[in-house]
Image (cartoon, coloured by chain):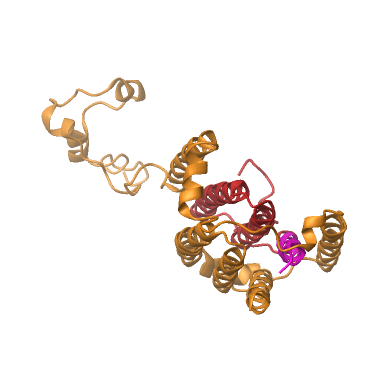
Chain colours: A red, B orange
Amino acid sequence: MSLAWYLTVSALVFCIGAGGVLTRRNPLVVLLCLELMLNAANIALIGFSRMWGNVDGQIFAIIVMVVAACEVCIGLGLVVAIYRRRLPIDVDELRELNG
Amino acid sequence: MTEVLFFIAATGAIAGAIGVVGLQNPFYSVLALVFHLLSLAALFLLLQAEFVAAAQVVVYAGAVMVLYVFVVAYVGAAEAAHLKTPIGGGQRTLAVLFALALFIELAIALLASGVAAIDSDGPQVPFGFGGPEQIGAAFLTKFLLAFEVASYLLLIAAVGAVVLARRRGGIHDEAETRVSVSDVLLPPGTGTMAEAVEGRTGTQAQRRLAPPAGTGAPREDRT
């Protein structure tokens, strides 16, 4: 398969994720859509790594996975903290930093 | 054969992504993301990134998604009805238009870039390309700094998650009185400087014997 197909899949998944971030109100689903966007970047990185015949791109993909895991960790911690304080779990309601 | 596998995996990845965005119940969204990640691991295998595919299945589709399922089970059910009301129609239309425009722009940028190798299958790679041996060698030589910084980042994220999600005021319930060793060992009437400043005299043990404030003295309207 030529690389263009992989890049097309990557672009499509990225756009679905971006649309999801803009349309969903539940912060948990917004985090899931961010994961989609990061994964789309991973497909492109690994595709280019294959194109170069070099593993450096795969290292980048693993680092992206590490950062995504950290982001999930902090994001879910924030959601749990919001839930504990009985605030509405809705990104439209949570507009102020001064909770 | 490669083509068939690619189209199966790509269809699965895109269907999973649409499922994440479209499904109303966040629990089903998480399951759709697991399906998406497994299809993505198949795509990584087709690109001969074996170690990344294995890490994707074990770490991402395994550990991270279990974390998601736990938090959805903890939080999601109580608030699900509230979140079902859709966002305004204008914003939804704008978001879909934005995503479409982004896709067209990305497709132009990627496919019309004129890079010759985009239409090729890539060079012949040696056996073991993308295996743990090559990844480990790259991590410990060329990308050593990134490796160390990533480990610090994971540590900071773990500590941050514990700090964010902990119960305020420690592990005790607020109603529960705390009994300290100093209640037994210290003579009555002694305490910390903070107690003296607040006007609280005596240790916990002595205060517990006294009636609660407001109940001992007779109320004036009764007398």
- Residue B78 highlighted magenta (yes or no): no
Q: Quadrant of residue B46?
A: bottom right
In the rendered view, tell whether residue B173 sits above or below residue A4: above
Residue A70 in view, yes or no: yes
- Is residue A12 part of the magenta span, yes or no? yes
Q: Residue at x 43, y 45 (%)?
A: B162
Asked whether, in this view, residue B63 is left or right of residue A75, the answer is left
Quadrant location of the C terminus of chain B in the rendered image: top left
Q: Nearer the viewer, residue B202 or B154?
A: B154
Q: Position of residue A8 (x, y in %)?
A: 76, 65
Which residue is painted at 61% across and 72% down in the image?
B81
Q: In this view of the protein, which residue sits in the foreground, A31 or B141?
A: B141
**Can you tell which quarter of the image residue B106 is in?**
bottom right
Depth check: B16 or B159 in front?
Answer: B16
A63 on left or right of B104: left
Q: Answer yes or no: is residue A90 visible.
A: no
Is the stretch drawn in magenta largely helix, strand or loop? Answer: helix
- Which segment did they paint magenta? A1-20
Say left or right for B20 vs A15.
Answer: left
From the top left corner, tell me how far across and down residue A81 is, in percent. 50, 50
Between B159 and B82, the one lying in front of the other is B159
Query: Is B134 located above or below residue B123 in the figure?
Result: above
Percent x, y for residue B172? 31, 47
